[in-house]
Amino acid sequence: MSSSSPSPLVSPTSSRSVTETVNGSHKFVIQGYSLAKGMGIGKHIASDNFTVGGYQWAIYFYPDGKNPEDNSTYVSVFIALASEGTDVRALFELTLVDQSGKGKHKVHSHFDRSLESGPYTLKYRGSMWGYKRFFRRALLETSDYLKDDCLKINCTVGVVVSAIDCSRLHSIQVPESDIGEHFGMLLENMECSDVTFDVAGEKFHAHKLVLAARSPIFRSKFFEVLEEDKQEIVISDLEPKVFKVNSSLIVPIVLHEVFGEHLFSSDGIVCFITVFLCFLQAILHFIYRDSLTEDVDVAGSGSSCMSSVSDTLVAKLLAAADRYGLERLRLMCESHLCKDISVNSVAKILALADQYHATELKAVCLKFAAENLAAVMRSDGFEYLKENCPSLQSELLKTVAGCEEDCSSGGGKSRSVWAQLSDGGDTNGRRVRQRT
């Protein structure tokens, strides 16, 4: 009687959900406070609508108070959901500005403190959060908060969004390499160099063959262009110290030959060296050692901020990799940027990937955006995408359609991608009641 063999174990899978806030602020100036008094209890002055997290918001100021029981003893301030939405969860902060310059503002905030019941939930359009007894009116009118019959109220809203962490779902593998252990020594000891740059009498050595082997652009410059084959190039009007980095010699003159004379004009040299020093060092480090510098690792770890992702060293290296045909460097940069994909950053990383032909990074961005469509559409980055890269929207829609096909065929998605956008109705499909 034969015993049955045990079934092989299936490898476990994992995922991670990340919940964060999409934040935005609005400044509301109330001019003519004394004229607004007496308009009636429960009547308000409203700010202009402002958008945070894909929803419209407004600040309501009640000069005679909102609660009839207080008999106009207090002024009331509220933040209202001014657009369609169901069960919108958010954090709030209201600040009455001290106009004396002393900085003693009156602040009510959900941020940076523990909430027993979590973020506040607004059920439908017209739902509000705030204070009926925001400030005693008699004290307000003799305080530094009121100046020249004017009040200033600052409001911050943080809309809560959830998304699946991209770094665990998607990864871009970079193959191992040991070329840097061998060719990296050439940069340090200058062995077998075949081109010398003379800068005010000081010699800088480089290797045409190494540069040409790593980049088709350098190859064209050194070996395919019909010009005199110079073994020594004299650079005048430049100090030798601008070509040294931590006692290690680098050869930005090679980049000078490619980029052009204007970058090394007497007016522009100091600014150019300051801005591109780290960039040049990273490029040469990669060309000779086939690896990234520590500066790239440090800079890449915080590049998820929307306003700065295109200015990071990793993004500049991606542009250089595309410009000079450095395919492995391109893949390294894609891998770094992939780790920083989030709801707030995915749109700009997608635009960057499309611009510099980073195909794997682009595919990951499209899939992540499709899987977290509702949250991404409420981010500032999506507005940037609509304004600057309209062609990418159609590609995103195609990716969404592909996710829908996976969902309908049992591909693992339990909830329709388009269902993420149903914030305007309840679970039974009915329109929610509007509150005015």
Image: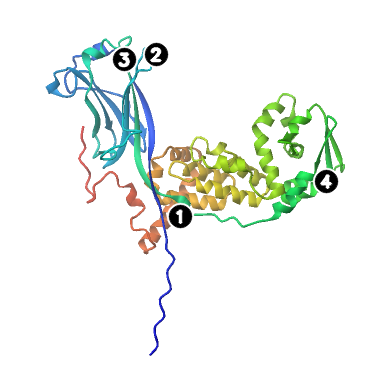
Q: Where 237 falls versus 302 (above or below)?
A: above
Query: Closest to the observer: 238 or 412?
Result: 238
Residue kind at label 3, given as amino acid type: Tyr
Q: Secondary structure at mark 2?
A: loop
Name the kind of residue labelled 2 in the image: Gly
Residue behind mark 3: 145
In what element is the residue under mark 1?
Answer: helix
4 and 3 marks in contact (CB < 8 Å): no
Residue pointed to by mark 4: 193
Task: Look at the numbered discs 4 and 1 and tell me whether their residues touch, using CB distance below 8 Å.
Answer: no
Mark positioned earlier in the residue sequence (4 or 3): 3
Disc on the earlier residue, 3 or 2: 2
First reached walking from the N terminus: tag 3 or tag 1: 3
**Which residue: 84% across, 40% down?**
196
The answer for how far apart the CA atoms under marks 3 and 2 are is 10 Å
Name the mark nearer the viewer: 1 or 2: 2
Circle number at residue 101 = 2
How far separated are the C-alphas under marks 4 and 1? 46 Å
Q: Residue at x 61, y 43 (%)?
A: 294
Visible residue check, residue 87: yes
Measure how far apart labels 4 and 3 are at the Cα level: 71 Å
* Mark pair 1, 2: CA separation: 50 Å
Q: Is residue 378 rendered to the left or right of residue 81? A: right
Q: Badge 2, how many Cα within 10 Å: few under 14, some, many 20+?
A: few
| Residue, disc 1 | 169
Q: Position of residue 407 (x, y in %)?
A: 37, 60
